[in-house]
Image: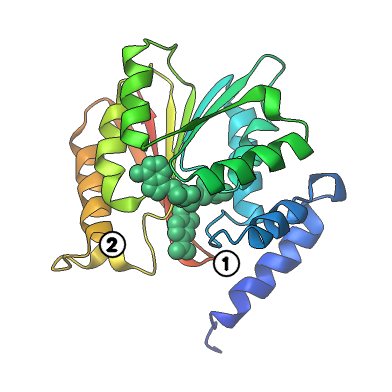
Amino acid sequence: MPLIKSENWSAVDQYLASHLIHADEDLNFVLSACDEAGLPRQSVSALQGKFLNLLVKLKGAKRILEIGTLGGYSAIWLASALPQGGRLITLEYNPLHLSTASMNLKKVGLLEKVTCRLGRAADSLQKLIDEKVEPFDMIFIDADKPNYPTYLELSLKLTKPGTLIVLDNMIREGTILEMESRATGVVGRRKTVELISQNPRLKATSLQTVGEKGHDGFVFALVE
Ligand code: SAH
Ligand code: DHB
Ligand code: MG
């Protein structure tokens, strides 16, 4: 059997996206705007964005929290699946990222469904807890990996039974296995898996992914 090479992963992603993502869903102009603003290429892929979009619809989510906005690409996939009156709150500490996101959200007419909060995500999460906001139906954790354990623990205070927590970039080329690593991203992601596994309120699984973003994967945790 021929070796399946990683060079194929992007081509397969592109083939699938060209068929499954329709013209009216094509958000490549958002990625171009992110490039033009000089943002790092850290947005989810189109197929992953559509996956998040379908999850929102499957859950019938009305309130979504996103941690890590960047240029608003995943925020647009999430918010465009919300019903009328639905809301997404997205947290970002980089003003250039957030202003790019606002511009992109405005372009697609989603600004009224989305609230962007500027500041360190841990601070913004604590503020949301202090404000006693209504719990969220879905939470997408996608900011700095060393702080994932903090984001998970604070996020849990903003959940109710049935809340779905989705964590991006949990596998990163298999580096999650590097037990001896002192790289904080690895420590943070391994600690997050431990916290999830030890929490009796959480029922969780993971899906590894390959594609244009390389080898990575999501963890999903359902609050019971
Ligand atoms: N969800 C986005 C990608 C997010 S990339 C998408 O898929 O389109 C990660 C983002 O987290 C970056 O914009 C980065 O500036 C932000 N970030 C990193 N550390 C942060 C922190 N401590 N508080 C808030 N945002 C942070
Ligand atoms: C990268 C990718 C991401 O999805 C992210 O959230 C942060 C960084 C990366 O490719 O470096
Ligand atoms: Mg990510």
Nearer the observer, 67 or 94: 94
- Residue 90 placement (x, y as % from top left): 51, 33
Pointer 2: what residue? 176
Q: Indicate the amino acid at tag 1.
A: Gly
Labels 2 & 1 near each other (Cβ < 8 A):
no
Q: Is residue 186 left or right of residue 12?
A: left
Q: Which mark is residue 211?
A: 1
Q: Is residue 150 left or right of residue 110?
A: left
Is the residue marked 1 within 8 Å of ligand 2, measured from its CB?
A: no
Q: Residue at x 69, y 37 (%)?
A: 105
Q: Is residue 26 above or below residue 202?
A: below
Quadrant of image for the C terminus: top left
The one nearer the camera, 202 or 69, is 69
Query: Mark 2 vs ligand 2: CB under 8 Å?
Result: no
Tell me if residue 195 comes above or below residue 26 in the rendering. Answer: above
**Is residue 219 shown to the viewer in this render?**
no
Q: Quadrant of the N terminus?
A: bottom right
Residue in the image at 37% along x and 11% along y: 131
Residue 138 x, y percent position in the rendering: 49, 28
Picture residue at 68% right of the left edge, 61% below the top: 36
Task: Answer with the quarter of the image where residue 106 lies.
Answer: top right
Who's the residue at 64% across and 57% down the image?
A: 37
> Which callout, 2 or 1, points at the residue further toward the start of the chain?
2
SS at circle 2: helix
Does 125 appear above or below 6?
Answer: above
Q: Tell me if I can see residue 130 in this picture.
A: yes
Count residues near mark 2 (Cα–Cα under 10 Å), then give few for <14, some for 14-19, many for 20+. Answer: many
Q: Secondary structure at mark 1?
A: strand
As drawn, the residue found furthest toward the right would be 23
- Relative to residue 73, is residue 131 depicted above or below? above
